[in-house]
Image (cartoon, helix red, strand yellow):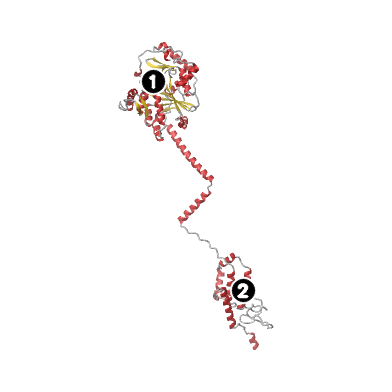
Amino acid sequence: MSDKNNDNRIDTPSDSEDLSSLISSAIENKKNGDQPVRSAEIPAQPPKRQPQTSSRPQPGRRVPQGAPKRPPQGTKGRPIKQGQRPAQSAQGQRSAQAQKSAQGQNKRPSAQKSAQGQNKRPSGAAHQGQKTQAARPNKGAQPTRSANSAQHNAQRKAPQRPPVKPVPKKELTAPAAAENTAAESETEKKAKWSKKKKTGVALAIIFIVFFLLLGFVVFMFFHYTGMLDRNTSEAKNYSKPTLNSSEFVDESDTFDKKSQEDELKAYLKKSARKISNENVINILLIGEDLRDTSEDSRGNTDVMLIISINKEQKTITMTSLMRDMYIYMSEFNYSYRLNAAYHAGGCEYLEECIEDYFQIEIDRYVRVSFQEFITVVDTIGGIDMKVSDEEAIGMHDPMAEQNTYLGNSRETDWLWEGGDLHLNGNQALAYARLRYVGNSDWERTERQRKVLKEVITKGRELSLLKINSLLNEVLPNVHTDLTDGEIASLLVDVFDILDYDIQEVRIPADGYYSNEIVDNMDVLLFNYNANAAIIQKVVYGDCKTVEEAIAQYQEETGDFYAYNSTYDPSYNPNYNNTNW
């Protein structure tokens, strides 16, 4: 009975040993700075497997030498059956935990893995099972404060880094986010633009602007040229023009008409060669008689002016052709004044006659009426002219005729004294048409050249708006055979051409013509060879004046005669050799 009681006896630590264990655990926790841990808050650890037999003495308990070894016992002092794990005491658990902590320190995990392991939260059933163990601790191995403190100290000794939390982006409203995105996109695009791309874009813009301007210029060019009268078909008029009563001369003929006509025919046969030069363009300017314009018929022309543009010599030569020069018109088989060629065959036939008698090529012609001349002068603001008292009074007759056709009163724009005057279009036209003051047609052609020269000078000062207004009003009444290409070529060089030197020539030249009367009208017989050579030397050569051309011609030919070889001076009672 006593043996049975001895076998069932349970050895438990005394109260003093439990108290000392608790005190030592509290002291250790305080040294380590830990807080007391409640058993309910620490999950129960599964019992560690221990060897069934161990000769190692229990920590905290002395075993005297030679004392018999006690068999392994359970938690309540009962002997452990075969195959059963011995339960560890609280002190043994602390010792095992300390040993495990020491082993863990020898194998320290990296800071990143430790941080990740602590931040990792058990999921699902594992998390729920952990809570269950915390709520229901294992009865076989109750955790003590010292064991939990050792585990906590081991965890504290391991280096831990706080997890790097991503910085939250500032939330933006939808419009602000769209603007931010657009700004970032624009910045990226600008950053991607290289110098080559910027240069390409700049060149593209320049080309676009250039082609737009070019298109506008081309449009305006065809707009203006489309206004011109290009009708070159003109009817032939085989009847002689009627002599104006104011030009009738009641005197007999001063030369043999038949012999003069034969001489003209012979000259036309041998004057087939015409001078031309690619650097020179000759444009014949034709001014219609005011009366012919008002009657819508083709009569004689009062103005015949050759404008020669020499790009090589950089000169503009204005050659006035006197209308009373006596010529033979082979196509119509009669002789008359030069201005009658326009009445007979129009602009083209007048051009042909000038080429035949002066052996130069007329490239193109331009015909204007006196109304257009008035418009041009008024548009440029008038011209300044030095007018004598005699000229001022003499302008009354042509101006009265002009006022009749313009619908003005008879004395409109009349002048009563001369001086340095500013003339409007009506007055400038009367000044250019004035014939019966001074040396008749000689001074008349001189006045025409003065007026035209002043118009060119004032035209350089016109603004683009005034030029546009002038062209729109004048061009519809301008008749020409100039092509669009020729006009374009002149316009390209117009600013250079306006700076050319202006030269003046009158044909026939002094000393190489004579005043004659035939069929009751005043005419001029002229030396064909001499006057043709004078025009050629000024227009195509290097002579700047008529005097230089005459001197050069006389040096080359020795021809000092006004008449041609077949002229008979006995027909002219006023002939005097000393005048030539």
Q: Residue at x 59, y 80 (%)?
A: 20
Say which quarter of the image contains residue 341.
top left
Which amino acid type is marked by label 2?
A: Ala
CA gap between label 2 and label 1 equals: 143 Å
Mark 2 or mark 1: name the one nearer the start of the chain. Answer: 2
Between 34 and 82, the one nearer to me in the picture: 34
Between 506 and 38, the one nearer to me in the picture: 506
Q: Secondary structure at mark 1?
A: helix
The answer to whether residue 118 is above or below residue 253 is below
Q: Residue furthest top?
A: 570
Circles 2 and 1, Cβ within 8 Å, touching? The answer is no
Q: Is residue 247 left or right of residue 154?
A: left
Query: Which residue position is annotated with label 2?
Result: 98
Q: Secondary structure at mark 2?
A: helix
Q: Quadrant of the N terminus?
A: bottom right
Q: Quadrant of the C terminus?
A: top left
Between 538 and 108, the one nearer to me in the picture: 538
Q: Check disc 1: other Cα within 10 Å, few if <14, some if 14-19, many if 20+.
A: some
Which amino acid type is marked by label 1?
A: Asp
* Picture disc at residue 317: none
Q: Residue 453, percent across and down?
A: 41, 27
Query: Which residue position is annotated with label 1?
Result: 441
Say which quarter of the image contains residue 398.
top left
Q: Residue 85, percent across and down?
A: 64, 77
Q: Residue 71, percent across and down?
A: 66, 81
Count the labels in the image.
Answer: 2
